[in-house]
């Protein structure tokens, strides 16, 4: 039982380390011909938003552009960066000792 508790503690520590590592992966997405740009990190947190002042006049267009920029930032290219980072970190191998 104590072994499993230690494994849970180790897993929690590894999860925190993984989040820190994933935070170093960044990807920018844009919309509205580059007038709206969003940068996200590997934890899917927005770390930067840039909006051209011309976009502020129409709230609906701005909202749509923000959604599109986010989809662009978190698309296939981003997913591939995350997969590569996880592979570099050992991926799911960290779970191999859990439960045994």
Image (cartoon, rainbow, N blue to C red):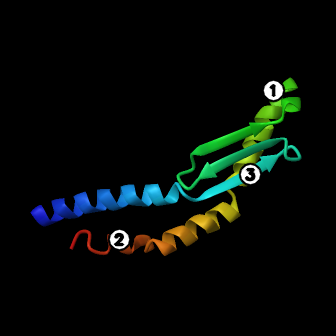
Which residue shows up at 30% across the image and 56% down it? 12
x then y, percent, for residue 100: 21, 74
x then y, percent, for residue 40: 63, 49
- Residue highlighted by disc 2: 94
Distance Cα–Cα, label 3 vs label 1: 19 Å
| Disc 1 residue crowd, few under 14, some 14–19, many 20+, Cα 10 Å | few
x then y, percent, for residue 91: 45, 72
Q: Taking 87 as reference, is 6 left or right?
A: left
Which residue shows up at 41% across the image and 71% down it? 92
Instruction: Identify the mark nearer the N-term, 2 or 3.
Output: 3
Instruction: Identify the mark nearer the N-term, 1 or 2.
Output: 1
SS of the residue under disc 3: strand
List the single residue furthest toward the left: 2
| Disc 2 residue crowd, few under 14, some 14–19, many 20+, Cα 10 Å | few
Q: Is residue 14 above or below residue 68?
A: below
Q: Quadrant of residue 19?
A: bottom left
Q: Quadrant of residue 16?
A: bottom left
| Disc 3 residue crowd, few under 14, some 14–19, many 20+, Cα 10 Å | many
SS of the residue under disc 1: helix
Q: Is residue 1 visible?
A: no
Instruction: Identify the mark nearer the N-term, 3 or 1.
Output: 3
SS of the residue under disc 2: helix
Q: Is residue 1 above or below residue 97?
A: above
Mark identifier at residue 82:
none
- Residue highlighted by disc 3: 29
Q: Taking 14 as reference, is 38 left or right?
A: right
Which residue shows up at 14% across the image and 66% down it? 3
Quarter of the figure with the N terminus: bottom left
- Residue highlighted by disc 1: 59
């Amino acid at each position: 039982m104590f072994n499993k508790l230690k494994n849970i503690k180790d897993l929690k520590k590894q999860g925190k380390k993984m989040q820190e590592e994933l935070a170093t992966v960044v990807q920018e997405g844009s919309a509205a011909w580059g007038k709206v740009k969003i940068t996200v990190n590997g934890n899917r947190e927005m770390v930067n938003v840039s909006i051209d002042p011309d976009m502020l006049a129409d709230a609906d267009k701005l909202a749509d552009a923000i959604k599109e920029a986010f989809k662009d930032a978190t698309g296939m290219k981003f997913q591939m960066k995350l997969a590569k980072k996880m592979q570099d970190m050992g991926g799911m191998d960290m779970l191999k000792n859990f439960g045994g």
